[in-house]
Image (tube, rainbow, N blue to C red):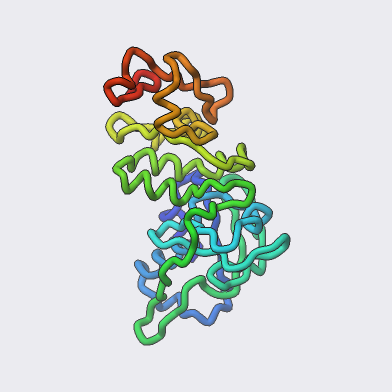
Amino acid sequence: MASLLPSLLPPQTPSTLFALPDHSTIPFSSLPLPRLRRLLRYHTLPHKLPFHSLSTSPIRACLPTLLPSPLVVTDAGKDFIFINGVPVTHPDIFVEGPYAIHGITRPFCPFDPSVGDFRIPDPLCDAQSGLFVGTRVGWYGVVRQLGSAGYVSFSVGLNSVVSRIVGGYPNLTAVTVFAPPDEGFDFVVAMSPVLERVVGLHIVPRRVDYGELASMPGGVGLPTLVPGRELKVGGGGGVARGVVEVEGRS
């Protein structure tokens, strides 16, 4: 399965992989390549999570994978975590650069010999519980809702850097996201530090509802996740038209 990693993961993309032992009873060598890729994607998270971060995930938290179906934290404590009922038995096998690899004894999804494939279960996690302890922001839910609302490029960008955001703001409990349209948002292919800065400029580290935003006088600054940078709330009668301008955009 290791030979599939170069084609699955773009270079320098933060990821967490859950590795199965070579002596596993699953007949990996006889599985078609598409099924192996699907299995590997289900065992890969698009964030780098060393064990100390992973094990502090709240129970029933969603852990997004490279498939539409997330994993679910079924039990966790200071020195242990169960994902989909499977214990992580060999934490931090490899933690270097953008990657973290942990060992498990069996797959997160059962193998069905009758069809020769793995059955990925329906997610039973709570998207609002957050991905990490120390933050009640349900980042998986935010990413999913942005994509569903049509802000696909920004949701992909946010998903790529959310682990860095959580690392920089471990006690974040609420955010306000000003999502730009797909047209013109071409930073998804940018290097991670650039993408992280651009995404951070669109996120205010507290909840600001429309009523509060509309009542603000023109020129008021909203702090962002980029230190020293603010979003300016515009004036000029925008509220009377039912539109509030932030940084000159409505």
- Which quarter of the image is occupied by the C terminus? top left
The answer to whether residue 148 is visible is yes
Q: Is residue 171 above or below residue 65?
A: above
Quarter occupied by residue 55: bottom right
Residue for point 50% across, 34% down:
196
Residue 149: image location, x then y, percent: 31, 44
Left or right side of 241 for 30: right
Left or right side of 4 for 92: right
Residue for point 54% across, 63% down:
60
Residue 93: image location, x then y, percent: 65, 60
The answer to whether residue 191 is visible is no
Q: Is residue 30 above or below residue 235?
A: below
Q: Residue furthest bottom?
A: 114
Q: Residue furthest right?
A: 79
Q: Is residue 82 above or below residue 140?
A: below
Residue for point 54% across, 33% down:
205
Residue for point 53% across, 34% down:
206
Total tally of numbered discs in the picture: 0
**Relative depth, front residue between 109 and 21:** 109
Left or right side of 192 for 119: left
Left or right side of 94 for 137: left
Residue 231: image location, x then y, percent: 46, 22
Residue 48: image location, x then y, percent: 57, 49
